[in-house]
Amino acid sequence: IVGSGHDSITGGGGHDTVKYDAALIAADITVVSGQWQVSDGTHGTDTLSNIQEVTDGTHNFLLVGAGGYATIQAAINAAHTGDTILVASGTYTEQDIVDGTHGASGITIQAVGAVTVDAPTSLVQTGVSPTSGNSIDSLFTVNGVNNVTVSGITFNGLQYGDNSHFAAGQTNPSLIGISYLNSSGGAIDNVTVTGMRESDAGIGDQRNLGIFVANTDPLVGHAVPTVSEAAALHTITIS
């Protein structure tokens, strides 16, 4: 896009991209009246319809909802290292995975407004615990890739963490809000995790977890690292 006027841009039926000749940041891209808008101070305010990606040639922003991708997972599948996925306000019923097949290291998934990811009625395995070998049915899973950030999203398990909602064929599954498995770097920022426990069974023993971070233990023979080993470990920031 070149020029300073206000433009309305409509995509077709595939993956449509709008490219700008000035640098963009996430704050330049918002949702107004159910449509994505781009306003970078140089090109006026542009309104987008059926556009899935906005780029300046260096920074790529994939859009979910409001005429962009229909699901967060679809945007993750299209993302490359360094991309930012912006999610419009709304409720998305899905389980999302970032791994070597879906998405890439170094991506950011960021809410634009109030975004909730609800558990589907039938929960599928999204990973396996590196420590116990049990099935993980997580609403958001990062597995084997690094520096992935999720920001501003509410994850609601709807208290579906019981045997009536776990798909068959799993090993002692748990419903988990956010799971980082064999991953380093990245951040879990300003998120809300709720509804992960199963409905009250009346037995005082509730399973499932809000956030689960685990790596295959590289410290053969002992589970607690020494001071020098701890200093060498990578971190995931939770804020």
Image (cartoon, helix red, strand yellow):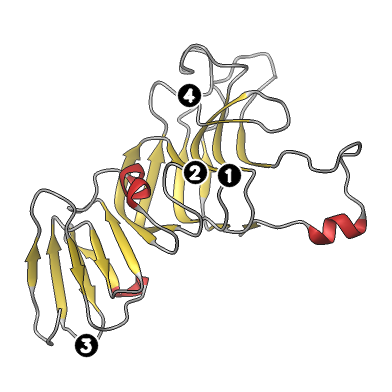
What amino acid type is highlighted by mark number 3? Thr
Image-based side of 103 in relation to 19, left or right: right
Q: Earlier in the sequence, mark 2 or mark 1?
A: 2
- Cα distance in 3D space between marks 4 and 3: 48 Å
Residue position for label 3: 42
Disc sitting over residue 160 in the figure:
4
Instruction: Residue 112: tell me if it is visible.
Output: no
Q: Are marks 2 and 4 in contact (CB under 8 Å)?
A: no
Q: Residue at x 71, y 57 (%)?
A: 234
Residue hosting label 1? 144
Q: Residue at x 32, y 77 (%)?
A: 24
Q: Amino acid at mark 1?
A: Gly
Disc 3 to disc 2, C-alpha distance:
37 Å
Dot 4, how many residues are within 10 Å of its Cα: few (below 14), some (14-19), or many (20+)? Answer: many
Query: What whole-number distance in Å separates the C-alpha atoms at marks 2 and 4?
Result: 24 Å
Helix or strand or loop: what does disc 3 sit on? Answer: loop
Query: Along the polypeptide, which appears first: circle 1 or circle 4?
Result: 1
Tag 2 residue: 99
SS for dot 2: loop
Q: Does the rendering let one see residue 80?
A: yes
